[in-house]
Amino acid sequence: MEIRKNINFYQAETSRYRASLIAVSKTHSIEKIMEAYEAGQRIFGENKVQELTGKYEVLPKDIQWHMIGHLQTNKVKFIVPFVALIHAVDSEKLLAEIDKQAGKAGRIIPCLLQVHIAEEETKFGFNDEELLDVLQKKSGAYTHVKISGLMAMATFTENQEQIRREFKHVKNLFEKVKRMNLPLEMKELSIGMSADYKIALEEGSTMVRIGSALFGGRASQVSVN
Ligand SMILES: *Cc1c(COP(=O)(O)O)cnc(C)c1O
């Protein structure tokens, strides 16, 4: 795996669309992350709290760490001191807990609300109605959470048209929320992974989350302790 070459390639791809590259380093070693860091990558994404905090502790402090996975309320306190963006917020309860813990830590934490766009039943996230409802009720309610955009995952399928349709759907929703004049700034649309990043960029992604295309396949969790 030539991590440097991959970072250069995907940074060029995303910058053509003025989007950012989130290097998804879950399960990958400190050495591999340092290779990406030395190639100039500064934003990394992890999906497990323990792995995220472990890596934060040992890696350079100018890395921006993004939590991209499902987050349990009882673990929020472990990441609020340092996390730069939380991508997959999927309940009011979680928003309230982030607000509370961020208040204690004296921080304001940017968060993205996860929208359920896939046809699969298993994925987390708000449906359209729930999203609009929570935004209408809560967008001005928090002092330590800054709702900054939306995040979504397309169906895991080879069907490119279906993926494109799902991304178009969330992009429309994103534009609709912008027009609602709520007290928040819809800036980021986090869509696109290794297999579908190109479609996501074409459909308006501002952040792609790329793992295996940068670091190779994931065998099993690595321990960082
Ligand atoms: C693992 C993961 C990714 C990256 O997936 P790849 O297919 O390896 O690029 C992106 N987003 C989330 C939420 C993930 O959990």
Image (spheres, rainbow, N blue to C red):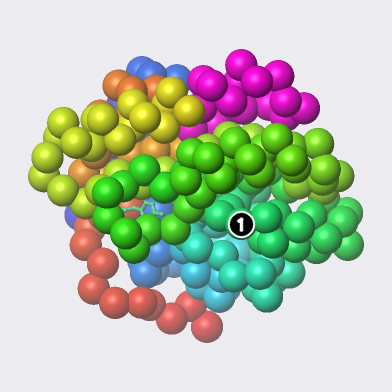
Name the secondary structure under disc 1: loop
Name the residue at 67% across, 60% down.
94
**Which quadrant of the figure shows ligand 1?**
bottom left
Residue 152: % across, % down: 42, 43
Of the pair 22 and 162, the residue shown nearer to us: 162
Residue 46 is a magenta residue: no
Residue position for label 1:
91
Examine the structure image and report whether residue 188 is included in the region drawn in magenta: yes
Q: Which residues are magenta?
A: 174-189
Which residue occupies the foreground of this view, 162 or 189? Answer: 162
Q: Position of residue 47 (x, y in %)?
A: 47, 63
Q: Characterize the local packing of mark 1: few (<14), some (14-19) or many (20 or more) Cα atoms within 10 angstroms.
A: some
Q: Residue at x 48, y 78 (%)?
A: 224
Depicted 16 relative to depicted 67: above or below: above
Amino acid tagged 1: Ser
Residue at the limit of the structure toward the left, as seen here: 158
Can you tell which quarter of the image residue 10 is in? top left
Name the residue located 52 percent from the left edge and 83 percent from the top edge.
225
Residue 97 lies left or right of residue 161; in this view the side is right
Image spot of residue 214 (x, y percent): 28, 49
